[in-house]
């Protein structure tokens, strides 16, 4: 079992390199896409440069135009999401061993990322039989996730704090939970199910504008699960559009659809079939996509 500190991150919110150890691994954290006041050049590249030789391994499965910059650097395993719908399958025993002694793991804070960290800590071995397939089902909707994975992923979708993330990590690494830990995860999962129900109701009332199903959640104080709303919206239209009360909008479509949001909206990276933009681009979104023919 590898002993290392695990730090949770996102592509646009990386930890300070001064707070990290001397041997760092990054798992399931994509290069930053271009957005309001953030980009690869402003966030990802300076982080890599500041780490220098302390960076031992970076594994990710998100497409980005700058992935090609690191193709000749053996530390980077950057693959297409189409080829690898989830990240844990890339955390092999051989790669864990090749990384050598590691004191810091940085992972994305969702189920896919935390499962990747758990697998690394376990020497490249799946936390439980089927976890690899569960990560694919939850992260890329390939297959059906188990009840165990749905419970943990649902809890993570509701509680965005490191306490809960570490509870999920511990559950995966150790295969057990104390009664109090289980209660916390279960409470979060119950809240997730309530938000999911409200999301389905929102999708059922969405307005169809050409190829778009518009779900407007602005001004609504009751929280909904955005991912569930987008999935339900795609049942009614080729493209689901969620308008949040946080000043952002999110688009999603089926991965098999001949549509690349990263290209259409020049984000520079991210998921081709799901993108989040600032609300001031709403008119642009409707203009470009309402007449899309699948």
Image (tube, rainbow, N blue to C red):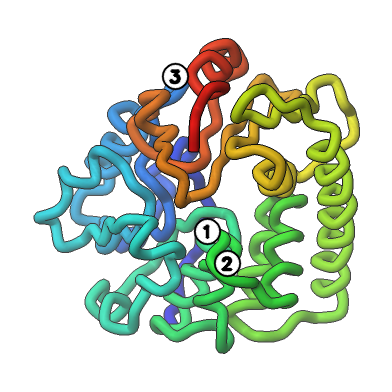
Point out the residue furthest to the bottom here.
129
Q: Nearer the viewer, residue 241 or 78?
A: 241
Is residue 46 visible in the rendered image? The answer is yes
Q: Secondary structure at mark 2?
A: helix
Is residue 223 visible in the rendered image? The answer is no
Disc 2: which residue? 137
Disc 1: which residue? 140
Q: Of callouts 3 and 1, which one flags the residue occurring earlier in the amino acid sequence? A: 3
Residue occupying the point 43% across, 65% down: 87
Q: Secondary structure at mark 1?
A: helix
Q: CA distance from mark 3 to mark 2?
A: 32 Å
Q: Nearer the viewer, residue 69 or 167?
A: 69
Residue occupying the point 61% across, 70% down: 169
Disc 3: which residue? 37
**Disc number lying in front (3 or 2):** 2
Point out the residue furthest to the left here.
72
Q: CA distance from mark 2 to mark 1?
A: 6 Å
User: Quadrant location of residue 125?
Assistant: bottom left
Is the residue 107 above or below the residue 257 in the image? below
Indicate left or right for 146 with 18 as reference: right
Residue occupying the point 85% across, 57% down: 193
Q: Secondary structure at mark 3?
A: loop
**Contact between labelled residues 1 and 2, with CB atoms less than 8 Å apart:** yes
Indicate left or right for 269 with 281 as reference: left
Indicate left or right for 153 with 276 as reference: right
Crowding around mark 3 (Cα neighbors within 10 Å: few <14, some 14 to 19, many 20+) is: few
**Quadrant placement of the N terminus:** bottom left
Is the residue 61 above or below the residue 11 in the image? below
Q: Position of residue 9 (x, y in %)?
A: 51, 48
Crowding around mark 2 (Cα neighbors within 10 Å: few <14, some 14 to 19, many 20+) is: many
Q: Position of residue 101 (x, y in %)?
A: 30, 75
């Amino acid at each position: 079992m590898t002993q290392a500190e695990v730090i949770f991150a996102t592509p646009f919110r990386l930890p300070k390199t001064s707070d990290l150890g001397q041997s760092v691994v990054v798992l399931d954290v994509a290069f930053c896409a271009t957005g309001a006041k953030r980009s690869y050049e402003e966030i990802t590249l300076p982080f890599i440069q500041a780490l220098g030789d302390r960076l031992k391994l970076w594994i990710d499965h998100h497409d980005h135009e700058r992935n090609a910059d690191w193709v000749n650097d053996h530390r980077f395993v950057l693959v297409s999401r189409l080829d690898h719908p989830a990240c844990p399958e890339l955390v092999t025993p051989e790669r864990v061993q090749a990384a050598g002694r590691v004191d810091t793991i940085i992972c994305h804070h969702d189920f896919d990322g935390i499962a990747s960290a758990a697998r690394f800590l376990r020497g490249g071995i799946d936390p439980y039989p089927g976890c690899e397939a569960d990560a694919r089902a939850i992260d890329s909707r390939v297959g059906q996730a188990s009840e165990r994975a749905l419970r943990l992923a649902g809890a993570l979708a509701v509680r965005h704090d490191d306490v809960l993330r570490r509870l999920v990590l511990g559950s995966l690494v150790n295969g057990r939970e104390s009664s109090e830990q289980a209660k916390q995860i279960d409470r979060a999962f119950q809240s997730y199910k309530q938000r999911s129900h409200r999301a389905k109701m929102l999708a059922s009332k969405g307005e169809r504008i050409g190829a778009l199903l518009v779900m407007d959640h602005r001004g609504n104080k009751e929280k909904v699960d955005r991912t569930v709303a987008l999935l339900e919206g795609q049942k009614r239209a080729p493209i689901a559009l969620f308008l949040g009360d946080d000043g952002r909008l999110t688009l999603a479509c089926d991965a098999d659809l001949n549509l690349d949001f990263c290209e259409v909206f020049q984000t520079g990276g991210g998921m081709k079939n799901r993108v989040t933009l600032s609300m001031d681009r709403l008119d642009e979104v409707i203009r470009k996509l309402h007449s899309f023919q699948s």
